[in-house]
């Protein structure tokens, strides 16, 4: 998968892309993540990417021209062997990101992420995107953090990125449930013991325990998921 990121603050991505799973995914050739500075597509000496909103109001609005020019160049770049990328605008007004949406995005061969900033983007930028995505009902100072969340959630689902094929199968939100409780050594700590069934070696009992605990935990913490699954 190829992911292009259009941002006014490319250095924000340095740390997350050079550590852990995302670093390994790129090292294995499973993902190519390219971060682009939107100011490279501005046309004035000051590299202006924002301006005051028409009609007045607080803050600044990201301009349409740099985004348009960037998308045009990235789509026509002869080095980009993957055509027809899905263009994603990160915005609090978008569709909420969930595991189902992450799975669909992980099937794409190429994504272009547009990171909003300041007071928002020129409305005409929305017309350039295939989908608008939000990571939750709250406001952040920029679209870079949501872009990082999306990248991490999508890349880890690419086959061969995680060390074990089963790693994503029983995670929270898979199958509409939260994940069952997990334990590791020591078997007892400060008087609290690991459930005996997990030490039994009986894989059938362990599987049954995990399924029942997932249901109990989901009903207690996220009953909305149970209701949604029953629809």
Image (cartoon, rainbow, N blue to C red):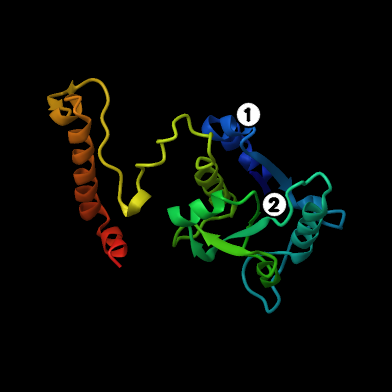
Q: Closest to the observer: 158 or 47?
A: 158
Which quadrant of the figure contains the N terminus?
A: top right
Q: Closest to the observer: 165 or 63?
A: 165
Q: Residue at x 63, y 36 (%)?
A: 14
Q: Residue at x 52, y 55 (%)?
A: 104
Q: Which of marks 1 and 2 precedes in the sequence?
A: 2
Q: Is residue 82 left or right of residue 25?
A: right
Q: Residue furthest front?
A: 204
Residue 173 in view of the camera: no
Q: Are marks 2 and 1 in contact (CB under 8 Å)?
A: no
Q: Residue at x 60, y 31 (%)?
A: 18
x, y (%) of residue 69?
81, 59
Q: Which residue is mark 2?
A: 6
Q: In the figure, residue 223 lies in which quadrant?
A: bottom left
Image height check: is 164 above or below 135? above
Q: Which residue is mark 1?
A: 27
Q: In the figure, residue 228 lies in which quadrant?
A: bottom left
x, y (%) of residue 159?
53, 38
The alpha-carbon separation of the residues under discs 2 and 1 comes to: 22 Å
Q: Closest to the observer: 64 or 213?
A: 213
x, y (%) of residue 19?
56, 30
Q: Residues within 10 Å of mark 1 (few under 14, many from 20)?
A: few
Q: Residue at x 34, y 42 (%)?
A: 170
Which quadrant of the figure contains the C terminus?
A: bottom left
Image height check: is 56 above or below 91? below
């Amino acid at each position: 998968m190829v992911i292009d990121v259009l941002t006014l603050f490319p250095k924000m991505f340095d740390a997350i892309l050079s550590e852990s799973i995302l670093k390994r995914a790129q090292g294995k050739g499973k993902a190519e993540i390219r971060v682009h500075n939107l100011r490279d597509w501005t046309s004035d000496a000051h590299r202006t990417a924002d301006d005051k909103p028409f009609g007045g109001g607080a803050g600044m609005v990201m301009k349409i021209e740099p985004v348009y020019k960037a998308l045009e160049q990235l789509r026509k770049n002869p080095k980009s062997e993957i055509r027809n990328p899905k263009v994603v605008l990160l915005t609090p007004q978008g569709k909420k990101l969930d595991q189902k949406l992450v799975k669909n995005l992980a099937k794409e061969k190429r994504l272009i992420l547009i990171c909003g900033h300041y007071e928002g983007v020129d409305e005409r930028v929305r017309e350039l995107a295939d989908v608008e995505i939000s990571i939750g009902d709250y406001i952040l100072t920029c679209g870079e953090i949501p872009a990082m969340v999306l990248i991490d959630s999508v890349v880890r689902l690419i086959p061969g990125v995680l060390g074990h094929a089963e790693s994503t199968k029983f995670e929270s939100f898979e199958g509409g449930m939260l994940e069952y409780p997990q334990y590791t050594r020591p078997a007892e700590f400060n008087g609290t013991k690991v459930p005996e069934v997990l030490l039994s070696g009986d894989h059938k009992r362990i599987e049954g325990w995990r399924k029942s605990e997932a249901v109990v935990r989901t009903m207690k913490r996220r009953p909305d998921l149970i209701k949604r699954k029953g629809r």
